[in-house]
Structure formats: C-alpha cells, structure tokens
C-alpha cells in the first residue's frame, strides 16, 4: 500500500491504487508548522482558521468583510401546489453604504451601486413560528421560473424543474435564486456584487478605481457563496424557517459554491455537493477529469487569480479539497456523484469525503462510513458525512434530491413535532 513510508511531515499516505500521485495529500490534522492536531480545541483554535485562510489565499480568494446595505421587498406571496405550499418571491437589494460612495459619484447613475437578487421560496403551508420548516437553499442556473416550470427550450439537465412538491410534502422548504443575479458568470468584475466592495478612496489607505479582484481576493465562487449567506440572513428573518436547519446545496459550479459557503458560514446546518468536481469535492491532486489548468483557463474568474498559479503543479497547493469538506465538520455534509460524470471525477469526489473523515471523528461524530466507493447496487453511504453515486451523467435529478432529503431527515431530524 501506498507511498506511506517516505512522506514529508504533514502528508497523508494514500494507497497508490486510489491516488497515483506521489506525496500523498496534505493532512487536515497537521498544522502548517508540523504540529499535530490532537484535540477539538486544536482544530477550532488553530487548524480550522489556518485552513480557511489557506483556501482564501490560494483558491477562492478572500471575501471582503465590509458592510453593504441590504433591503428586502416582497414581490408576491400566496398559496401554491394546491395549497400545500406558500410561495414567496422577494427582491433583495444590496448597496454600497452611502458613506462609502465617493462624493463625486451620483449613485443612481452608477449601476454598480446596487445589486438585486430575486429569491423564490416554497415553504410547507403548515410551517409557522411554532413549527418552522427546515429549508434547502440552492442557487439555480437558469432562473427561478425554470426551477418551477422547467424550460421547453432545450433538454439541458439544468433546465429541469426541481421536485418542489416532493420536498414540500416531506416537510422541507426550498429557497433559490439565479446565481447570475449575484454575479454574472463572465470574466468581468465590473458587474455583480464585487464592485460594491471596491476601494472607493474614501477610507484612508484605499486605492480608488479598483476594477478587478487582487491576487488573493474573491472571484465568482466567492461572490456566489457570499450571496448564499445573504439569502440565509433573509431566510433566518422569516419565522416560518427553522433558522438552525438551513441546508446549502448546489450542482456543479454551484456545488463548489455551496461547500465554500458552508465552510465560511457556520450558520448553514448542512452542505450538499452534487457533481461539484474540480474546485468542489474532488481532489485536485488526482488530476483526473478537470484539472486546475483546465478550470482556470476556461473559468479564470471563478477563483482568486493566485489559483491559476497551481495549474500543472497541484502538489504545491497548500490545501486540497478534502480539507474544504473538513471545514464543514461536524455538521452533516453530503457528496453526490454520477457514474458517467467523469469530468467531475466521481472517485475523486468520494475520496474528498473519505479524507475529510478524520476531522469529523476528531470532533466526536461519524465520518464517512465507507473506505471504498459504493457499488451500484448499494449506492448510498448514509453516514453523517454521506455519499451516493448514481448511474448517468452530470445533472441534479429528482432522485438526487430525494437522497439529499433522506440525509437531512437522518441527520437534521426531519420536520419537528409541535
Ligand atoms: C464546466 C466546468 C465544471 C463545472 C461545470 C458546471 O463543466 O468545467 O467545473 O462544474 O461546468 O458548472 O456545470
């Protein structure tokens, strides 16, 4: 087995058959200075902050912690699904604080001063302040109307409607917004939420006129994750929502954003990654399917600029994606793969979960209860750090959703009794 014997300090031995990369993986339970992480306190006080900072610095970029002014306006509210659900549409608006806008700028003339995100929420009709519903929060690719109604235009799986009725009937609310509302998915940082945080020159030490993130500043994934947290703020203010049981989920690039959001924001009760692949649950060091080079050349704007520097030299990355899943611990996390989705490296996604497990165990909860990828006849690993693989290609299917709800039932306790 493996390259275990001559590993540098802080490297995990990984059997060759699983990961044919010499040098193993960075160990989530060894600090950058080589100190072992032996207790939960070591994890919370030293290792977790250090890993989070490393993901910011080298992968997703730092999210600014400056304030924005947020507003919420209900656009529509009423019964849906034959009265089984309450459907709410809300427009969230984010603005640069007035104090931060240079005197020379006329806010109304500058589109970058306000970003509007339309949030669609379905809640079980019975949800109330005394019996609030757990909610799945997931961004969508093509607009809220496609989540509800699908699209007749083409057969791309991202056009499929979501199983809202099934989820509501199981006691779950669903909240969604189009990711493009938060930050358009193009290599241009003059739109979306980034400009709300650009240096205005008003604060001493700032350079005015910034138009792109710096080397270690957030890209689009960071912005989508930030948006998820702002939608969470909004959901938590609704007493029909169980604030302690909001599950962040996402497919593909939005699965990457979902895990990053749960890593950054511990208010999310659980994270679900569907076919998230490179930059999500899959180990970068495997270089199977999409590589750092492939993703940073096609989608340079998703990450901080520094991440592209690891193209072809993944072994130099101070982190790998099992450590991102470990940042969700001890909260439940669920990784889903599809057999034919080789671009996302299903085995690499499984291993991402597997090598996050030691952190769950250190924190006194169950990690991934499997050491080998599950077989097609028993595809679900139902542990607190859970996993499934299904036949077929890159998509988030009704069957995937049903398993996310199974995992939430199991680990977050289902709909409360009143
Ligand atoms: C591309 C990209 C993936 C991404 C996917 C998606 O295939 O290479 O990294 O996950 O798009 O978001 O659908």
Image (tube, rainbow, N blue to C red):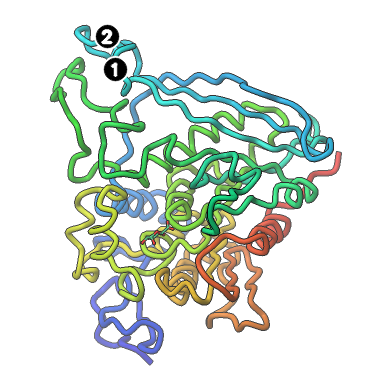
Q: Which secondary structure, mark 2?
A: loop
Label at residue 110? 1
- Relative to 185, residue 413 above or below: below
The x, y position of residue 413, in whole percent, is: 74, 52
x then y, percent, for residue 178:
50, 40
Within-10-Å neighbours for mark 2: few <14, some 14–19, many 20+: few
Residue 160 position within the rendered picture, expressed as x and y whole percent measured from the top left = 60, 54
Name the element at disc 1.
Answer: loop
- Residue drawn at x 51%, y 56% as measured from the top left: 251
Residue projecting furthest to the bottom = 1
Q: Which residue is mark 2?
A: 106
Q: How many marks?
A: 2
**Residue 359 or residue 403, whichever sits in front:** 403
Residue occupying image coordinates x 46% and y 70%: 349
Residue 1, image x, y percentages: 38, 92
- The answer to which image quadrant residue 182 occupies is top left
Label 1 neighbour load within 10 Å: few <14, some 14-19, many 20+: few
Q: Looking at the image, which is closer to me, 315 or 43?
A: 315
């Amino acid at each position: 087995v493996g390259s275990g014997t001559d590993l540098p300090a802080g490297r995990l031995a990984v059997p060759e058959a699983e990961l044919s990369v010499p040098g193993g993986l960075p160990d989530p339970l060894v600090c950058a200075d080589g100190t072992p992480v032996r207790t939960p306190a070591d994890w919370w006080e030293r290792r977790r902050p250090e890993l989070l900072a490393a993901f910011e610095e080298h992968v997703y970029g730092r999210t600014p912690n400056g304030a924005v002014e947020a507003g919420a306006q209900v656009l529509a509210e009423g019964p849906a699904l034959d009265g089984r659900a309450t459907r709410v549409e809300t427009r969230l608006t984010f603005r640069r604080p007035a104090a931060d806008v240079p005197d020379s700028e006329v806010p109304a003339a500058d589109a970058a001063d306000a970003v509007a995100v339309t949030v669609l929420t379905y809640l079980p009709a019975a949800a109330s302040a005394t019996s609030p519903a757990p909610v799945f929060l997931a961004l969508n690719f093509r607009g809220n109307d496609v989540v509800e109604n699908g699209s007749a235009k083409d057969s791309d799986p991202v056009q499929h409607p979501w199983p809202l009725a099934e989820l509501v009937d199981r006691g779950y609310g669903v909240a969604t917004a189009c990711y493009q509302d938060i930050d358009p998915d193009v290599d241009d940082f003059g739109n979306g939420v980034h400009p709300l945080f650009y240096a205005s020159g008003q604060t001493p030490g700032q350079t005015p006129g910034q138009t792109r993130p710096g080397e270690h500043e957030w890209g689009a994934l960071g912005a989508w994750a930030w948006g998820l947290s702002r939608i969470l703020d909004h959901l938590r203010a609704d007493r029909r929502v169980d604030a302690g049981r909001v599950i962040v989920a996402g497919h593909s690039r939005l699965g990457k954003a979902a895990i990053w959001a749960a890593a950054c924001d511990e208010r999310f009760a659980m994270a679900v990654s569907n076919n998230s692949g490179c930059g999500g649950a899959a180990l970068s060091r495997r270089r199977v399917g999409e590589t750092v080079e492939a993703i940073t050349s096609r989608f340079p704007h998703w990450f901080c600029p520094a991440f592209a520097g690891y193209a072809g030299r993944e072994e130099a990355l101070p982190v790998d994606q099992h450590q991102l899943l470990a940042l969700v611990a001890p909260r439940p996390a669920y990784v889903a793969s599809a057999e034919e989705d080789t671009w996302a490296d299903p085995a690499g996604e499984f291993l991402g979960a597997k090598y996050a497990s030691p952190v769950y165990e250190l924190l006194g909860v169950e990690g991934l209860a499997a050491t080998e990828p599950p077989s097609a006849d028993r595809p679900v690993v139902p542990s607190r750090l859970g996993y499934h693989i299904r036949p077929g290609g890159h998509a988030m299917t009704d069957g995937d959703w049903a398993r996310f709800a199974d995992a939430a039932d199991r680990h977050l306790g289902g709909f409360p009794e009143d």
